């Protein structure tokens, strides 16, 4: 192995943010690109750099299950639990270091910057042989103006990125000093305020921070996304009985009707069919297997819980729901006037944009059990993109 030309170092990755502006139902660091979570992509870059002494991720405790999935098979120390803000989270991360590590180098890197290059990490570590603090900073390519159309000198400006490098003790001291000051969105900014000079190491545009749905699409392109499309089918029937409150629950909403559907849960036939379709697409059994009617927990349960769980399981597999199409088969009640409200409700349960959900209805021309108004049937087809497998 060649001798490394930079000092040994630790890494802290703040990943406690809950931003879901990417359009995903989960924080962006746990969204999958190219079949792997963003956080995992990021971690793997640092694991491949020589001289790494420790790598700790700072997480929101509520997402521990996703974290465990992201780091499966990696030998990492326990994650640190973050605070209310990124600054607090980093401060918590710094507290995890021992007294004899205060002179060691630490790199702070955003979880949502998976395109950091190993060479850039090595560059910033190299600079730290002589500097007190450093940050990756990218030149500005576009012409910059303020809102009054005054041109700004782009040559004098930089886009602040991560990683940022510090000695653990001095960054801790800076955090201590500015503990109740919320002006700072990055650690180098906070360090600069203490009078320390920040060395600028050239960053690149591909090291962008995934923030929006557009960033997610760009990330997928950069990784040469490898996904496969799967479909799942669902079918369900429930019989009518008298409705004590004059309402029937279908498609996640209550519609006025003298009869309701009979079942252990709220008997929402449309949501049951869709739940089964989603489970089918990812090969995870069926609704009765996950939520057994023998279990009293699910007595009169809101079927939104079942659908939400199916959506969560798709996400845990790194999948994305592309489309859900439901057909409700009955003579009454009339579904047409409630179709759009059902689509909106179902999309909201799954955290999807409305255009990814379709609800339709048909009668059976008076034939069969639905024609005799004995009950309602529903069919659903779910289309899901999953990380490609060989
Ligand atoms: Mg059912």
Image: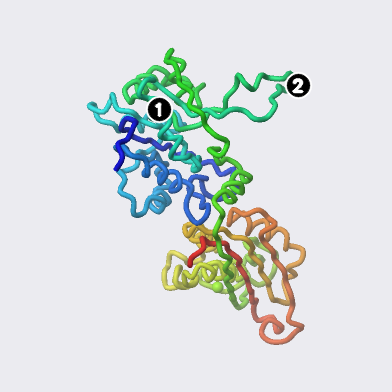
Query: Whole-percent x and y of residue 242?
Result: 63, 74
Pick whichever, 241 or 191, lies toward us. Answer: 191
Q: Closer to the N terminus: mark 2 or mark 1?
A: 2
Contact between marks 2 and 1 (CB within 8 A): the answer is no
The residue positioned 55% from the left and 38% from the top of the image is 208
Left or right of residue 32, residue 174 in this image: left
Query: Whole-percent x and y of residue 254?
Result: 65, 62
The N terminus, quarter of image: top left
The residue positioned 50% from the left and 60% from the top of the image is 309
Left or right of residue 240, residue 145 in this image: right
Pick whichever, 141 or 93, lies toward us. Answer: 141
Rendered view: 324 above or below 375: above
Question: In the orientation shown, which residue stands out farthest toward the bottom?
Answer: 368
Circle 2 packing at 10 Å, graded few (<14), some (14-19), many (20+), is few
Q: CA distance from mark 2 to mark 1?
A: 35 Å
Residue wearing tag 2: 149
As helix, strand or loop, the secondary structure at mark 1 comes to strand
Query: Whole-percent x and y of residue 267?
Result: 57, 70
Pick whichever, 80 or 137, lies toward us. Answer: 137
The residue positioned 36% from the left and 54% from the top of the image is 72
Left or right of residue 82, residue 148 in this image: right
Rendered view: 348 above or below 272: above
The image's mark for residue 165 is 1
Q: Give the quarter the ligand 1 occupies.
A: bottom right
The image's mark for residue 309 is none
Quarter of the image for residue 262 reads: bottom right
């Amino acid at each position: 192995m060649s001798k490394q030309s930079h000092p040994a170092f630790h890494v802290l990755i703040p990943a406690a943010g809950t931003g879901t502006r990417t359009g995903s139902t989960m924080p962006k660091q746990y969204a999958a690109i190219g079949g792997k979570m963003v956080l995992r992509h990021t971690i793997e870059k640092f694991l491949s750099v020589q001289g790494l002494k420790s790598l700790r991720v700072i997480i929101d405790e509520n997402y521990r299950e996703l974290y465990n999935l992201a780091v499966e098979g990696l030998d990492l120390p326990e994650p640190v639990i973050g605070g209310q803000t990124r600054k607090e989270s980093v401060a918590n991360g710094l507290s995890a270091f021992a007294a004899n590590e205060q002179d060691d180098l630490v790199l702070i890197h955003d979880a949502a910057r998976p395109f950091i290059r190993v060479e850039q990490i090595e560059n910033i570590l190299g600079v730290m042989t002589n500097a007190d603090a450093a940050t990756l900073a990218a030149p500005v390519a576009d012409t910059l103006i303020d809102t009054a159309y005054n041109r700004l000198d782009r040559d004098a400006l930089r886009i602040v990125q991560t990683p940022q490098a510090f000695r653990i003790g001095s960054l801790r001291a800076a955090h201590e000093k500015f503990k109740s000051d919320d002006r700072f969105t990055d650690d180098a900014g906070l360090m600069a305020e203490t009078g320390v000079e920040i060395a600028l190491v050239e960053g690149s545009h591909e090291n962008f921070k995934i923030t929006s749905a557009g960033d997610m699409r760009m990330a997928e392109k950069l990784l040469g996304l490898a996904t496969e499309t799967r479909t799942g089918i669902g079918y369900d029937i429930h019989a009518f009985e008298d409705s004590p409150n004059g309402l029937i629950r279908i498609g996640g909403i209550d519609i006025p009707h003298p009869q309701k559907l009979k079942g252990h849960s709220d008997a929402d036939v449309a949501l049951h069919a869709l739940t089964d379709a989603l489970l089918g697409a990812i090969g995870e059994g069926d609704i009765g297997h996950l939520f057994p009617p023998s279990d009293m927990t699910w007595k009169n349960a809101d079927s939104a819980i079942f659908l939400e769980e199916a959506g969560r399981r798709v996400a845990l597999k790194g999948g994305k729901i592309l489309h859900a199409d439901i057909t409700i088969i009955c003579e009454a009640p009339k579904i047409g006037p409630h179709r759009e409200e059902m689509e909106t409700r179902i999309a909201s349960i799954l955290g999807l944009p409305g255009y990814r959900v379709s609800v339709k209805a048909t009668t059976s021309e008076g034939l069969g059990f639905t024609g005799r108004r004995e009950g309602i049937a529903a069919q659903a087809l779910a289309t899901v993109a999953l990380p490609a497998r060989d």
